[in-house]
Amino acid sequence: MNKVLIVTYYWPPSGGAGVQRWLKFSKYLPEFGWEPIILTVDPGCAAYPVTDLSLKENLPSSIRVYPTPAINYFGIYRKDRSKIPTAGFANSVDNTLKGKIFRFIRGNFFLPDPRKGWNKYAFKKACELIENEGIINVITTSPPHSTQLIGLKIKKKYPALNWIADLRDPWTDIYYYKQFYPTFISKMIDQRFEKSVLKKADKIITVGVSLKNLFSLKIKGLENKTEVITNGYDEDDFTGITPIIPPMFTITYVGTLSDIYPIDGFLNAVQIFKDKGNEIILRFIGTVSKSQKDLIQSKSGDSILEFIPYVNHTAAIQYMLKTSVLLLIIPDHKSNKSIITGKIFEYIASGKPIVCIGPLDGDAAGIIGNKEYGKTFSYMDSKGISEYLASLISEKPVLERTSSAVYSRKELTGKIIPLLSNRN
């Protein structure tokens, strides 16, 4: 087989959305004649917000994985690895002086992010693999965006190599960027990193059209070398799990729910829905901030509330299949049109209707469509949300899954192949 080196910080036992993309692409690349060789961080040195040991079960044993050491700068902040903040402090609710100081340090002294402590070890191993394996294709995926600097350095040393930079999120335009209090100089340095990667990479992959357009504004002609390959779902993950219609109308949210996710309009809609005599269960699976949990409890009245801590990927899908409705919330930010959460595709694959709360002209809304997979509402459209919920409760529930093959991981893996250079 032809070989491709995939440089990714997140790999099992890491859990969460970030690990799924290249874990699944790597699973299916051999079916297209390509052997993925994985370069990642040693779990003992890594800074994972969550772990998920179950993800290793889906991975073919034939895939070669090379972990390297790293300096874990998050260890300076917190010795307990289970308390590592997601998005590098962005979802932290610690607004004490100490918390703000830590965010300032992260945003000005660890550019582009604290996981850059892996870079020198990864670069050394990458060079070894490139030379020993005769590799001419390298893919770097981020966040963390410091991983892209590994690709930048590799390209400088091996200019004939085909370097593909996969960017799953915005860089200096990410919705929580200002929470790091970057100085003018720090932002200028970070923007220089970003533009260097966009300019030097042979090809760019993004997860959505808006993100492609955002990056294209930074470098002239970038759109000509940029391919949109969305995230997706793996049909194998749903095998053997039977959809269930719960006896009581249940709305389920899966994932992190920090303070940056507006939920007031939805909670008001739930109250309107209940005032019409409907009973409801609200289920939140994952990390919910204290202030959000307090708000939910204060505004939910006598609704049945379930707060379930982070569960592994298999369990998360099981919960998706035993609910009435799935809730998706997009953070309220000027760049939120480009946000496409990874879970949206597994939501779609579940066949359950989706209530999306976010920009009506955003990429997520475009994927969901108008009633095809669910419906998108503006943040404070409580009346519209409640009416849609009422329409769902009056419809006959469907047990059959009606997912779209266009978002299957195998189908999406096929879109990567034309971007790779064949040595022949």
Image: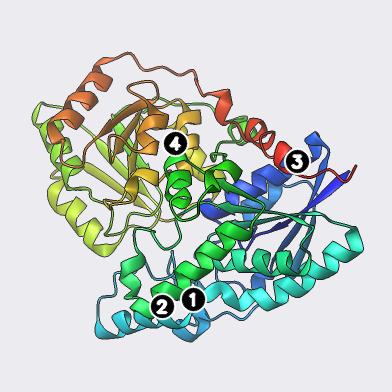
| Residue bearing mark 1 | 111
Q: Disc 4 versus disc 3: distance between alpha carbons?
A: 27 Å
Can you tell which of label 4 and label 3 is closer to the viewer?
A: 3
Total numbered labels placed on residues in the image: 4
Q: Nearer the viewer, mark 4 or mark 1?
A: 1
Q: Quadrant of the N terminus?
A: top right
Work out how far the residue at label 4 is from the one at label 2, CA to CA, in angstroms: 41 Å
Amino acid at pointer 1: Leu
The quadrant where residue 239 appears: top right
In the image, taking residue 375 as reference, residue 141 lies left or right, namely: right
Q: Amino acid at mark 2?
A: Ser
Whole-angstrom CA distance, mark 3 to mark 2, is 38 Å
In the rendered image, the residue lying farthest to the left is 275
Sequence order check: which comes first, mark 1 or mark 2? 1
Q: Residue at x 33, y 54 (%)?
A: 257
Q: Nearer the viewer, mark 4 or mark 2?
A: 2
Report, in whole angstroms, how far the alpha carbon at label 1 lies from the one at label 3. 32 Å
Assess whether mark 2 and mark 1 are in contact (beta carbons under 8 angstroms): yes
Q: Could one spot residue 131 in this view of the protein?
A: yes
Mark 1 touching mark 3, by CB under 8 A?
Answer: no
Rendered image: mark on residue 218? none
Say which label, 4 or 3, has the lower sequence index.
Answer: 3
Mark 1 secondary-structure assignment: loop
Q: Residue, x 23% and y 50% (percent of image)?
A: 262
Give the image location of residue 227, x and y in percent. 58, 41
Q: Earlier in the sequence, mark 1 or mark 3?
A: 3
Q: Which residue is mark 3?
A: 29
- Residue beneath label 2, please? 186
Residue 42 falls left or right of residue 255: right
| Residue 241 figure quarter | top right
Q: Nearer the viewer, mark 1 or mark 2?
A: 2
Q: Is residue 229 above or below residue 217?
A: above
